[in-house]
Amino acid sequence: MPHIATEMKKRSLILVTVDCLRADHVGFLGYPRPVTPNLDALAANSIVFSNAIVAGAPTYFSFPAILASRYPLALGRDVLGIAPNEPTLASALHEAGYATAAFLAGNPYLGRRFGYDQGFDSFQDFLTGGTLGEPASSDLAPQSGLSKLNRLIEAGSRRNPLSANAYDELYFWYCQWMSARQDIPMDKLRRYPAANVIVDQAQSWLSGLGDQPFFLWLHLMDPHHPYYPPAEALAALGLPRITARRARFLNSFWNRGDIGPQRLQRHRKEILSLYDAGVYWVDKQISRLVEALQPLQRWDETVLAVTADHGEAFLEHGDRYHSPTSLPEYLIRVPLLLRAPELSGRRLLEEPFSLIHLAPTLLEAVGVAAPDSFQGRSSWAQISAGTLPGGPVITECVDGCCNPIRPEDRLRPRLMAMREREFKLVINFREGRDYLYDLKNDPAETSPLPPGDHMRERGRLFQAARMHLQRTSDKHKTDLRLRALLRDLQQSGKMTAATQASRSVDEGRRASVRLM
Amino acid sequence: MTQYRTVHLPEELCAAAEKSVAEKFDSVEALIIFLLQEIVKNDPSQFDRAEEQMIEQRLKDLGYI
């Protein structure tokens, strides 16, 4: 059972997770554009991790580790989210007497459906509105008699590549012409609540708390595509010329599936500006949250962690967004800033730190014991002393699982990365191949080392991979796995669909059940 | 030909199950068959075993085991 250490006064905890925030796009880790002035100021008296590595990517493979300190495939790769009754950071603090609240900016993989509400007194996931992702070009097209004609033309154009390309090009520009006729403001184009909405909710909740220790989790989506930052953020970064209409065009262009990286490069700089403006807005709102704690006399007793669930691709290897088809640094390395009231000065920790250890570390920072089920271990004592243990950290996901709602998408080979400070081994089980990178000399992972090179490093990292698979096998957590599968069954509608099937079971051939 | 076996379940559990799923399943047998089919139909451990074998083979190739 979690307990408060008797010698320590109860401290409160705030965890801010930012969707898609890359480590190399925050000032306190060296980004030159001034997008995070407030976090940079906070970092001056915090522990800063320059190599914080997610345990899974994207969101649905990352958060089991952040909230429940459990590797994403440890319950079986067909299990999504937090299992019913699985101990989490929130449940441990709730049992220890904390008031708990989560305000999450509408990521569909972080809702009640996947168990993320467990342990929270108050849980707002903003999932009643729109969905993520840029609409397909067809969504922008007028729904009229022209649609039928359009489909006929499209079908005809697909007969050869040249006409198909011509059709795609014309159709894209036709959709742009149509959408440009509507003047929709940036705030209407955004698919999720901006960070100020989330912080408003958090402030309201905090103001009604009294003296009770609290745990507050905020998940902010502003850097997530489609990139529609508030106009104020663009103006602050000197980018007032990117209007809502321009942003709409840029997002549509960036989302094109019919053109290659070379053409997409044309607007990469502006897309990065939109992304950075989202980061700026997150920074500004975190500052508002901190300012709200001060008059409530809570800031001096609060531990704050700011991190991300994964990064984002901007054509570095020709890719966009954050699909789990590879595990490059820009997807798995995230910012991590840890602020505790007693810390003064900036402590930079450069050894890799896995977010599997974040939840137990935060629990120790506030004096609450971590649940036995956690696979990570607290590093609070070491990091307070300014050190981190060496050794590889591990990231895993299901290769190419871009739509985890479909069970068949989750039943695929694993993709995993073993990351040390200098070397990184990526194992692609679908291909049956592995790739070793020398991050010191090739930080952009442009070319893996030749297969016969660095055998000692390969051996060390393969041994770490083997140990990881043995330690995280699902066979020890069958109860959690079954509960999660049952929850998914109930939510998938299969239980209802099974009604008809059950009626067709041959009475004479049923298993006999003796009642006791 | 499918073989069947007898299993023993607590009476009160069966009664509760009959009550809670009466609208969806005709019987406790149908419910249990459905649940077991769903649980065993996707076995992710087949991937785990194949992945462990691949790693072991690479470690053998590297002379570690």
Image: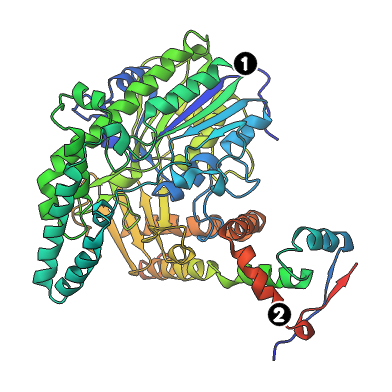
Mark 1 or mark 2: which is in front?
2
Q: Is residue A250 visible?
A: no
Question: Does A203 sit left or right of A35 as displayed?
Answer: right
The residue marked by circle 2 belongs to what chain? A
Contact (Cβ within 8 Å) of mark 1 with mark 2: no
Q: Is residue A51 visible?
A: yes
Q: Quadrant of residue A453?
A: bottom left
In the picture of the structure, the residue carrying the numbered disc 1 is: A9
Neighbour tally class for label 1: few under 14, some 14-19, many 20 plus, Cα within 10 Å: few
**Percent position of residue A489, x then y:** 60, 60
Residue placed furthest toward the front = A145
Q: Amino acid at mark 2?
A: Val
- Check residue A410 in the rendering and tell me which mark sits there, or answer none: none
Looking at this view, is A367 or A292 the one in front? A292
The residue marked by circle 1 belongs to what chain? A
Of the numbered discs 1 and 2, the one sitting upstream in the chain is 1
Instruction: Answer yes or no: are tags 1 and 2 on the same subunit.
Output: yes
Neighbour tally class for label 2: few under 14, some 14-19, many 20 plus, Cα within 10 Å: some
Q: Which residue is pictured at 39% across the width and 56% down the height? A: A416
In the picture of the structure, the residue carrying the numbered disc 2 is: A505
